[in-house]
């Protein structure tokens, strides 16, 4: 038994949190045994080893619901919008993942960077090559991160080295799913990139495989106005971008839709009817001048909502950063587009933890500190000029989310074990 001591924040599905200023997590065999007041738990477990993080804040491991492994070296590069940025920066980068050594090195750095920022679960696009996806799974497993990964599928309108036929894309995906789906903490996610790069045939086949094997599907939806115009041209018989996905069968309660920036009311209704999940990627939406998602409106209207870093459209692998961006973008939406209540830091933290777990249907295992869940834990220092005992619960949450001077976790535990970065420079180095 060990007790991890510090300021504990436990988020819940209803967007409430419970906070203990002098709290502790009792950990046994990789699981949360109990979460509560340090004094109570140390009396109850007098022989427990104590790891004292003093005034650091302890939260559940963060869950990134949308990111691209091959892209992280392009963070912050370029100034164009989606399509030209994909062509100039992203497709050339993804083409390099045919090189096995490069794919492994990049995967190792990618997962190390995620873990050091407190992300212990992530939903990921690998490069479009089967081997690169296989390597991504291997490295994720070695690192013990909980990973939902898919080989990016494209069969048209993209460079030759990145596309394959619909049949080949599906055959490769099935093979990868057979090897990796439900291998420990791994899940396979069918990954048609977006409607511009995928034929109707590929999307229909995706829907069939997803239904057969109960797999998640991830794609991009309604990110950029030029993208939407192109989809209209490519699929003239459909009344909207969302209807393309819906009529081809890929919208279910296991479908993650990144961006959802420019949806009509009718499209929002379709997503609600299908119980699919809209993934908010606020930093990326700013970086690529895509727009601002009406996140708070979606929440009010009971659209399933999550948060993703969308690296390298997003310029940080820190999900705390993304949670902050979500709050800031909700202010801009309210001021510039339509008056709305503001998304709170507390709501944003819940989206980045327990709500994501709920949408991935793994909330019996991760997402908060309920007894019996995996001890996936991230410890963050507050800025040293703050005195936590003078702050309210919401102020502590806000301080952690806005602590942009330090996005590296002080410590990260996966299944109760301290994550040791193989970056020999250690935790303090801002890799
Ligand atoms: N739409 C299709 N592919 C991508 C991608 O790689 N990044 C982003 N942000 N949007 C996309
Ligand atoms: Zn993306």
Image (cartoon, helix red, strand yellow):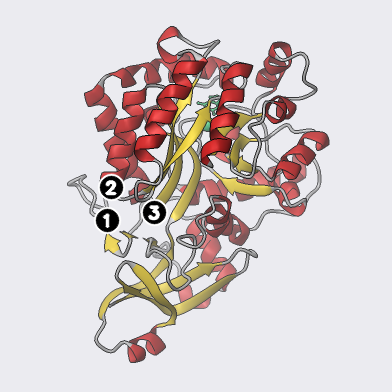
- Of the numbered discs 2 and 1, the one sitting upstream in the chain is 2
Q: Report x, y in % for residue 180.
A: 36, 39
Q: Quadrant of residue 200?
A: top right
Do the numbered discs 2 and 1 sit on residues whose CB atoms are within 8 Å? yes
Q: Residues within 10 Å of mark 3 (few under 14, many from 20)?
A: many
Q: Report x, y in % for residue 19.
A: 52, 74
Q: Is residue 60 visible?
A: yes
Q: State the quadrant of the N terminus.
A: bottom left
Do the numbered discs 3 and 1 sit on residues whose CB atoms are within 8 Å? no
* Residue 419 numbered mark, or none: 1
Question: Which residue lies at the image location 53% right of the left edge and 31% below the top edge?
Answer: 209
Question: Which residue lies at the image location 51% right of the left edge and 69% below the top edge?
Answer: 10
Q: Measured along the vertical axis of the image, is residue 268 above or below residue 23?
A: above
Do the numbered discs 3 and 2 sit on residues whose CB atoms are within 8 Å? no
Q: Measured along the vertical axis of the image, is residue 77 above or below residue 157?
A: below
* Residue 143 numbered mark, or none: 2
Q: Is residue 387 visible?
A: no
- Of the numbered discs 3 and 1, the one sitting upstream in the chain is 3
Q: Report x, y in % for residue 272.
A: 74, 44
Q: Residues within 10 Å of mark 1 (few under 14, many from 20)?
A: many
Q: Measured along the vertical axis of the image, is residue 364 above or below residue 24?
A: above
SS class of the residue under badge 2?
A: helix
* 267 left or right, relative to 287: right
List the single residue furthest toward the bottom. Answer: 43
Q: Quadrant of residue 80?
A: top right
- Of the numbered discs 3 and 2, the one sitting upstream in the chain is 3
Q: Quadrant of residue 104?
A: top left
The reply to whether the residue tagged 3 has its Cβ within 8 angstroms of ligand 2 is: no
SS class of the residue under badge 3?
A: loop
Q: Which residue is mark 3?
A: 118
């Amino acid at each position: 038994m060990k007790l991890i001591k510090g300021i504990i924040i436990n988020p819940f599905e209803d967007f409430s949190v419970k906070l203990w200023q002098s709290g502790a997590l009792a950990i046994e065999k990789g699981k949360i045994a109990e979460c509560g007041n340090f004094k109570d738990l140390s009396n109850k477990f007098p022989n427990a080893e104590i790891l004292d993080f003093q005034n650091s804040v302890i939260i559940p491991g963060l869950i990134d619901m949308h990111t691209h492994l091959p892209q992280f070296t392009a963070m912050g590069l370029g100034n164009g919008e989606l399509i030209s940025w994909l062509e100039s920066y992203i497709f050339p980068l993804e083409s390099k993942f045919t090189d096995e050594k490069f794919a492994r090195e990049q995967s190792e750095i990618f997962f190390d960077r995620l873990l050091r920022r407190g992300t212990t679960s992530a939903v990921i696009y690998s490069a479009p090559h089967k081997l690169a996806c296989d390597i991504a799974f291997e490295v994720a497993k070695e690192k013990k991160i909980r990973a939902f990964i898919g080989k990016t599928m494209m069969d048209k309108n993209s460079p030759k080295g990145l596309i394959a036929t619909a049949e080949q894309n599906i055959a490769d995906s099935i093979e990868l799913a057979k090897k990796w789906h439900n291998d420990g903490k791994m899940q396979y996610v069918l990954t048609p990139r977006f409607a511009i790069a995928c034929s109707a045939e590929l999307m229909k086949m995706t829907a069939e495989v997803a239904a057969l094997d109960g797999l998640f599907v991830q794609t991009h939806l309604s990110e950029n106005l030029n993208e939407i115009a192109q989809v209209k041209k490519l699929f003239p018989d459909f009344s909207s971008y969302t209807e393309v996905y819906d009529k081809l069968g890929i919208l279910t309660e296991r479908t993650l839709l990144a961006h959802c920036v420019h949806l009509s009311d009718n499209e929002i209704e379709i997503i609600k009817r299908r119980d699919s999940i809209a993934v908010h990627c606020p930093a990326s939406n700013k970086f690529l001048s895509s727009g601002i998602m009406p996140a708070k409106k979606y929440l009010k209207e009971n659209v399933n909502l999550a948060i993703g870093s969308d690296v390298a459209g997003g310029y940080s692998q820190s999900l705390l950063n993304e949670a902050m961006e979500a709050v800031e973008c909700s202010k801009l939406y309210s001021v510039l587009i339509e008056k709305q209540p503001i998304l709170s830091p507390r709501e944003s933290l819940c989206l980045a933890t327990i709500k994501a777990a709920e949408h991935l249907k793994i909330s019996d295992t991760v997402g908060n500190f309920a007894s019996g869940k995996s001890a996936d834990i991230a410890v963050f220092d507050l800025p040293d000029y703050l005195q936590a005992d003078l702050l309210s619960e919401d102020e502590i949450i806000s301080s952690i989310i806005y602590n942009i001077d330090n996005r590296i976790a002080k410590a990260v535990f996966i299944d109760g074990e301290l994550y040791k970065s193989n970056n020999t420079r250690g935790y303090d180095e801002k890799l």
